Image (cartoon, helix red, strand yellow):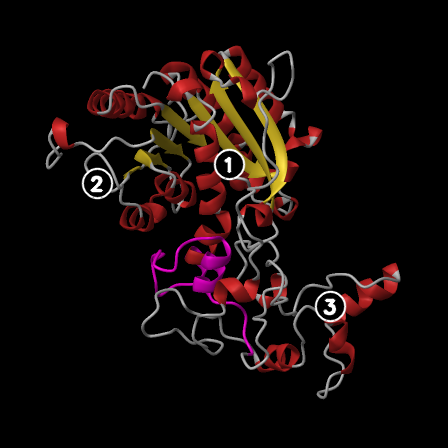
Amino acid sequence: MMSGVASRDKVKAPNFLAVDFFCGAGGTTRGLIDSGGYVIAGIDKDDRCAKTYADNNINESVDYAPARFLNYDVFPKTDDYEAGQQDELVEKLDSLLSYYKGKTPGVPLLFAICAPCQPFTTLSRKELSDKRKKGREKDRSLLTEASEYVSRYKPEMVLSENVAGIKDPKYGNIWEDFRERLNQLGYVTGSKVVCTSRFGVPQYRKRSILIAVRRELVREERFADLMETELLVPEADPNAMVMTVADAIGHLPPVSAGETHTDIPNHRARALSELNLKRLSSAMPGESNAYMASTEFGDLTLDCHRKVNARLNDRCFSDVYTRMHPDRPSPTITTKCHSISNGRFGHYDTSQVRGISLREAAILQSFPDDYVFYPTEQIEPVARMIGNAVPPRLARYFATYLVNSLEARGAR
């Protein structure tokens, strides 16, 4: 079935097997591999992530093969939704899971289920076309649909990550419903909002974490209560140091706005207009954009900001057209991280009048320096992949935590 696979007596057993649902460009998968797991496959319906995912995620055990990118829609096909490919995906997973469980007997299985976060973010609540509205509504059902795969395959562990706001009741209790479904399927669960900066990620990024372990396998010390109904969810990695922006990206060579470094993939900064070059050249690291009112070039405040500030008698949008603070973690890296008009995304070094590069954004998300995003000659698609990714260090920590939550490593 699998060509080029090592013989059984030479197989290096991983800490766990994994399937990464909604894998995108592979942030979660990178973390799972770094924690000693073997990622059988990542699943995503967006094939634009395929090359980035497969080229950067080579497993380090069993057959040393790249994690497979499975381009499937997880929903079932119906008269109302003809794009569904659940039957085909189940057939593929049945085959892969059977094979790899046979190669690594007793090794536990982890499902990473990190559904797209756009339906649950404040920034996503803009005017959308009818088609995109329907797509967003469908995406809000992804966790519910993913629980059906948990029901079918009964992995020992489940890891889910999403925006902090997913718990808001206005989204219909999707997070709690998912958790309750896992409880019904025989898992003990825990959930908490954490900040990635406390896990060695050089970025302030609040995320909801949900972890689950099959009830009969949980180590006693992992329970959060005497009734053994909830798992402890750490708020920080005790072994991680807080990493600053300068710590993370200070080693990279300078580039100018609109320039791409010839030797470092994705070290590319967006071009700036003359006006924005004047604005950013007047900005000091870590300060608000109040500086724009009195620069050497005059008042460079945007007219729209001036009107809003006057109407509300307050300064709004104070982070745009500003520089990061070198001695703190970065602000949240978004899909617009290449644009200084969309947040505090100016480089901290005042000799570099530009926004951060895509390479720097990826590093602030805790991707390794050699993780290449494709197409390398474009900005928008790469920024989208980076901003949407789960920070690999966060995934690595919680995957390790889950495996260590298993009593005697399950059946091993």
Please name the amino acid that badge 3 sits on: Ser
Q: Is residue 62 left or right of residue 321?
A: left
Quarter residue 27 falls in: top left
Q: Nearer the viewer, mark 1 or mark 2?
A: 2
Residue at the bottom extreme, as displayed: 296
Q: Nearer the viewer, mark 3 or mark 1?
A: 3
Dot 1 corresponds to which residue? Answer: 135
Please name the amino acid that badge 1 sits on: Gly
Q: Residue at x 62, y 42 (%)?
A: 121
- Is 358 contained in the magenta span? yes
Residue 95: mark in rendering: none
Q: Please tell me which of labels 1 and 2 falls first in the chain.
A: 2
Secondary structure beneath dot 1 equals helix
Secondary structure beneath dot 2 equals loop
Does residue 141 appear in the picture of this structure?
no
Residue 270 location, x and y as percent? 49, 70
Quarter residue 277 falls in: bottom right
Task: Give the position of the N terminus as an image quadrant.
Answer: top left
Dot 3 corresponds to which residue? Answer: 288
Residue 65: mark in rendering: 2
Please name the amino acid that badge 2 sits on: Ala
Q: CA distance from mark 2 to mark 3?
A: 48 Å
Residue 382 location, x and y as percent? 42, 57
**What's drawn in magenta, residue-wise?**
353-381
